[in-house]
Image (cartoon, rainbow, N blue to C red):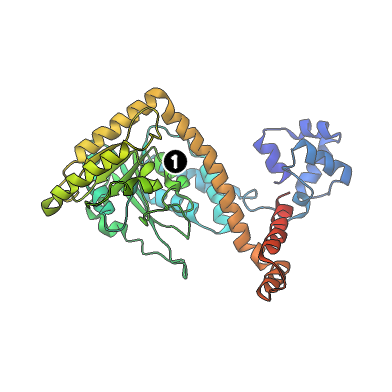
């Protein structure tokens, strides 16, 4: 971290900091501007005083674009934030694109954008998962239109799986939610997973903040729907809803899947026509199975509902439970406590993503790493030892 950034972040004046390390404020200004490089004894003092956040490398390496964002960009982003608060969806779409971008300049702009957003606890974040074909998009559209009729502003973050070969994705959820996509009180944003696990995109939590800034009080996060790995979304939402198909069989299947154990609400979709009786049996099985699972939430127990998205049946019951769920969690304080814990988890998730970016964009291209990889391929190096050596390179980069 650049010293200039550290002082600004912790609101320390140049004069106060210079006194603490025993130099004049003029000398400190020269160090900050790059006009002079601190001698070793001063570097050690700066390192200790900043708890290692500013080290010698920060005075020799090229500046981080996120710290040198021009005033022009900053003013544009501030204007964008104001437009988002006024409900201008074009600016909201631009903001989410900025947040999702992997370009260094865009990352810097996104960091500045996010620092200007407010924290919002007036929204309800609803995570929705289920296997392909369960009818997630149809359910969200039916439920979303119902909520809009009640006066809510509804947004959808629909995560599409990215190709492991090309990185591309289909992004077709808007075409599956035609009514919702053209409603003035709705906003649908398909996002590529970019190879990210856990059923969400890399920047889903940041996109949620953009949506809340725009005044959307209902936010659906529709996961990729691969069935087993959608657990990260649980740490981003207020209520976790699992959609299931009507099917007979062993009720214990629900217990074997960790994703079912985390469900706050299980909805048996397509409970109509010839499948209605099967759906009722499925609901009974999952209710019995829940008696064998300890509740994750202390203040409210999960429930199972029947639903037909195509016939709009069961939607009201589902919404009544969500209201009851929110009220109970806010009354106990666990709603706000969970949001705070999610912030902490987001810190570590972002650190992991930044490390991943460094490995992909920098570490793999280093000649020393390429040599290690070649030696492994020739069976001259053991995989574990090679991993440790490369990990040491990462630690040197960090510390």
Q: Nearer the viewer, residue 184 or 41?
A: 41
Q: How busy is the neighbourhood of tag 1: few (under 14 within 10 Å), some, or many (20 plus)?
A: some
Where residue 375 sits, quadrant-wise, is bottom right
State whether residue 108 is above or below residue 51. below
Where residue 61 sits, quadrant-wise, is bottom right
Q: Nearer the viewer, residue 72 or 108?
A: 108
For image coordinates 43% across by 25% down, the residue present is 333
Q: Residue furthest left?
A: 273
In the rendering, at what x and y percent does residue 97 appear?
Answer: 45, 55
Would residue 394 be seen by someone viewing this image from the given angle?
A: yes
Q: Secondary structure at mark 1?
A: helix
For image coordinates 72% across by 73% down, the residue present is 380
For image coordinates 52% across by 40% down, the residue present is 116
In the rendering, at what x and y percent does residue 281 appear?
Answer: 19, 45
Would residue 144 be seen by someone viewing this image from the given angle?
A: no
Q: Residue furthest top?
A: 331
Count up the numbered dots.
1
For image coordinates 37% across by 56% down, the residue present is 224
Where residue 392 sits, quadrant-wise, is bottom right
Q: Residue furthest bottom?
A: 378
In the rendering, at what x and y percent does residue 163 appear?
Answer: 43, 66
In the rendering, at what x and y percent does residue 165 appear?
Answer: 47, 70
Question: What residue is shown with label 1?
Answer: 82
């Amino acid at each position: 971290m650049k010293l200039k950034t550290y002082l600004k972040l912790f609101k320390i004046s140049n004069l106060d900091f210079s006194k603490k390390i025993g130099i004049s404020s003029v000398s400190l200004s020269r160090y900050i501007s790059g006009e002079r490089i601190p001698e070793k004894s001063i570097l050690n003092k700066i390192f200790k005083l900043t708890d290692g956040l500013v080290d010698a490398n920060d005075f020799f390496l090229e500046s981080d674009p996120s710290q040198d964002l021009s005033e022009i960009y900053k003013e544009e982003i501030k204007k964008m934030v104001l437009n988002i608060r006024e409900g201008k969806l074009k600016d909201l779409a631009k903001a989410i694109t900025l947040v999702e971008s992997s370009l260094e300049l865009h990352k810097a702009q996104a960091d500045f954008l996010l620092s200007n957003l407010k924290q919002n606890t007036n929204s309800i974040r609803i995570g929705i998962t289920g296997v392909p074909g369960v009818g997630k998009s149809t359910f969200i559209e039916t439920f979303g239109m119902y909520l809009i009729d009640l006066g809510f502003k509804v947004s959808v973050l629909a995560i599409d799986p990215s190709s492991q070969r090309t990185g591309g994705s289909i992004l077709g959820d808007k075409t599956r939610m035609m009514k919702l996509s053209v409603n003035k009180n709705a906003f649908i944003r398909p996002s590529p997973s970019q190879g990210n696990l856990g059923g969400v995109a890399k920047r889903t939590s940041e996109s949620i903040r953009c949506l809340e800034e725009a005044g959307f009080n209902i936010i659906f996060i529709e996961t990729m729907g691969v069935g087993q790995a959608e657990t990260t979304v649980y740490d981003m939402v207020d209520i976790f809803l699992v959609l299931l198909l009507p099917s007979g069989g062993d009720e214990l299947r629900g217990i074997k899947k960790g994703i079912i154990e985390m469900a706050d609400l299980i909805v048996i979709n397509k409970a109509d026509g010839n499948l209605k009786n099967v759906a009722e049996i499925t609901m009974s099985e999952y209710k019995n199975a829940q008696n064998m699972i300890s509740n994750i939430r202390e203040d409210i127990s999960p429930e199972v509902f029947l639903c037909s998205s195509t016939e709009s049946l069961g939607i009201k019951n589902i919404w009544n439970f969500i209201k009851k769920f929110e009220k109970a969690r806010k009354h106990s304080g666990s709603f706000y406590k969970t949001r705070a814990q999610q912030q902490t988890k987001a810190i570590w998730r972002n650190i992991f993503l930044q490390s991943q970016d460094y490995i992909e964009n920098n570490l793999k291209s280093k000649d020393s790493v390429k040599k290690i990889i070649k030696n492994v391929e020739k069976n001259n190096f053991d995989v574990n030892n090679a991993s440790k050596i490369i990990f040491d390179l990462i630690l040197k980069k960090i510390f």
